[in-house]
Each structure stands twice: as structure tokens, then as C-alpha cells.
Amino acid sequence: MSFVPVILGTDINAYGVARSLHEAYGIKSYAIGRKPLRYTRKSKILHVETYGDFYTDQGFLRVMEDFAQTHKKEGTLLLISCSDEYTSLITKYKDRLAKDYVFNYIDHALQERLENKLDFYEICEDYGLDYPKTQIISLDNYQNFNWPSHYPLGLKANDSIEYVHLDFDGKKKFYKIHSQEDLEETVQLIYGAGYQGELILQDYIPGDSSAMFVLNAYVDSQGEVTMMCLGKCLLDECLPTEIGNYNALLTLGDQAIYDQYESFLKRIGYRGFANFDLKYDERDGKYKVFEINIRQGRSSYYMTAGGCNFMTYYVADLIENKRLKTHYHFDQGLWLYVDPAVLRKYVNPKDKDLALTHLRRGYSFTQWYEKDQSLARFMDYWRRRLSTRKYYPIYQEKRQEEDQA
């Protein structure tokens, strides 16, 4: 059956999805988003369309309906989201979209509960998933909040969609808090910038990014988990606005984690891709979950790089109507989004032999694809590599100094 991949987003996640589809099926995808981004520009495997109002309900529906009318004769329109905003719009308008597109996402009510971290932690409590001890700060209570006495702590926005649109000096995706004064100043900064939502204040689990793991899974339209792929973080992002993103991941496997999260997904009636961020807590030997994304993660191509082409499970389910047994991925493969020299220098010493071994074996860099090469893409690829050589000595070393203070 012929099909047309319709990817919502123009970022590195979108390119990873398109590349995975092209590797598996030799097919060219469409990427629709708000604005052109360097990750998907000048590509031979993508048609990119951008609309300034695509994030609004009215603009989204107009574009999706117009696109379907123009392209539906080309084959089945397979819809894939690459951001929280687009996932929310898909779940909100599932009935209207289902007339023209095939996709596999949970309903809007469950999506809102899972993406609201407060509700998600309540669900974790109900289903036995470990998570960091958490307190809530709100616009109503922050001025008379009962400040904790133990530090360090982690602070982040509960409403990621609202927060991402704010622009202010000192903005970070994640804040490591070292004192009450630090906490008070940071909370005031965020609410002073116009943020209206709640803030999540959590016990800071010891250790750097080498204790972080990412788990992606796919639950088919019949409710069966058909793919699980775990990645170990070897290096995370150090730019303040992007801390929490991964820049080097190694695929591996852990059956205990797979069993626990497979059971969780099936018990809550989940559908589609799920992306979990975990951190190993050496104090009690448990992996603790921070959040779930109702889509494949930003660094999703790490799975394909490690030998698990995640998009083949989506296509098997929705296009080929195949019912697959669960694939628990254990093979190792390295995905990078920094220059290899940066990984060699800044990887945690306990993981250095592992990193060096896989650098020698070979690695994948999402943007640099042998079947999608051009001078423009070569320049973008090297611009990214060289930029990491420049900013890691500034920001990563500053982070390390703060951690040791």
C-alpha cells in the first residue's frame, strides 16, 4: 500500500523521523511547521511547508484540511507529531483528522493528564513508578511558600507549552537550585517574566547526565507494546536554555525496565509512541521517572542509529496492518549531536572507555545522511560540530564548577 508520511514539525526530531522512513522505505516525507529550521532545510528526503499560524487551532485545521485535499490521491496520509503542541492539536481534533489521516494517539483527556506533571506523578503513585519527591509552587502561593531546608533541588515549569514561548534573560529549561535565596530569586524571575502556570520543585537526584536514561516505546492500535528501546546518556546539552536535552546516547537494554514500563503502558490504556526520561538514583538503586512525552523523543533517531528503526513499527501497525511481537532492544549503537572530540573530553570518566569503544566502531549524526548530502547540509553539519567545540568549554566547565562549589 502506498503512503505519504506527514510529519508535524521542522526540527531535528522531524528530520530523524523522515530519515528513518527514508532508510526503511526509500520514501520522501512532508514536514509541516510554523517556520523553517536548519535541521530540515535543503533536504532531498523532505518537502517542507511552513505556516505562521500553524500552532493555532484555526490555522492548524485549515492547513491540515487543505493538505489532505491536495495530497490524498497520492496514498494513505500517515500523520506523525514531533512536538507537544502538535500532539495536543492531534488529540484535540482526532475525529476531524481521522477523516483524512491515519495515526495512533491517545485521547485528549489522557494526554492532558499525562503531560501535566502533577497528574502524571499521581498516576505514577497509583501504578508503582518511582519518581523524585516533589513540591508544587504556584502563582498564588510562591510569595508565602514554605521554602525547603535541604538543597540542591531541581526546578522546572509544569506547563512546558506555555513556558517555551516565554523569552527572558536567565531562562533555562531546568534549574539546579543550591539555596533558599537562589530558589526565591529564580521563582521571582520566572513569574516576573509572565509565566502563569505551576512550577515543579523536586529532590535533586545525585549524579551528572551519565545517570540519565531515555526510554521510547510504541503501543500499537490494538494496545500491544511492540517496541521498547532504552538509551543511556553519555553527554547532555550544556546551553542554559537546552539543559535536559541529550547530545550523545548509546542504545542498550534492561529487561526489568522494559517489563515495568510495558505493564504501565498497557494498564493505563496507552496508544502510540511514548518517551520517558529516567535517572538512576544510587541512594536507593531505583530508576526514577521525570516525565512522559506523548510522542517519540527529540533525539528519537538514536533508536535507528542503534539498530532499532522505530518508524517501521508505526508503519507495520497503521499501513501494513501487521500484528508484531514485542521487540526489546538490546544491541548497542552510538548517536551523537556533538563533535566526537567534545564527547571524548566531557564524557564522565566512568563511561569514557564505553564512549571511546563506540566512537571507534562508528556513530550516527542525525543531520548527516549519505542519501541526503549537499553543500548546504554539509555546512550545517559542520557548523553544529564546530559550535559544540566552542561552547562546551564555556558552559560545561561552568556547570562543573557550580556542581563542585
Image (cartoon, rainbow, N blue to C red):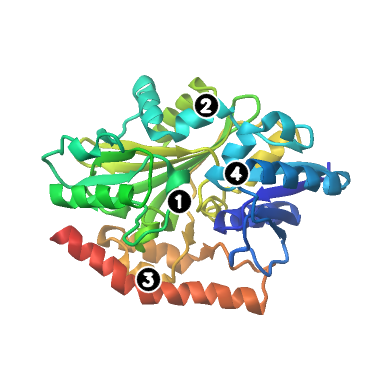
Q: Which residue was labeled with disc 2?
A: 110
Dot placed on the residue nearer the N-terminal end, 4 or 1: 4
Residue type, mark 1 in image: Val
Which numbered disc, 4 or 1, marks the residue closer to the eye? 1
Which type of secondary structure does the marked residue at label 3 adopt? Answer: helix
State yes or no: discs 4 and 1 in contact (Cβ < 8 Å): no
Q: CA distance from mark 4 to mark 1?
A: 14 Å
Q: Which residue was labeled with disc 3?
A: 342
Residue type, mark 2 in image: Leu
Vertical arrangement, residue 340 with respect to residue 248, above or below: below
Dot placed on the residue nearer the N-terminal end, 2 or 3: 2
State yes or no: discs 2 and 4 in contact (Cβ < 8 Å): no
Q: Which residue was labeled with disc 4?
A: 86
Q: Which residue was labeled with disc 1?
A: 164
Dot placed on the residue nearer the N-terminal end, 2 or 1: 2
Dot placed on the residue nearer the N-terminal end, 4 or 3: 4
- Extreme left residue here? 149
Q: CA distance from mark 3 to mark 1?
A: 27 Å
Which type of secondary structure does the marked residue at label 4 adopt? Answer: helix
Quarter in which the N terminus is drawn:
top right
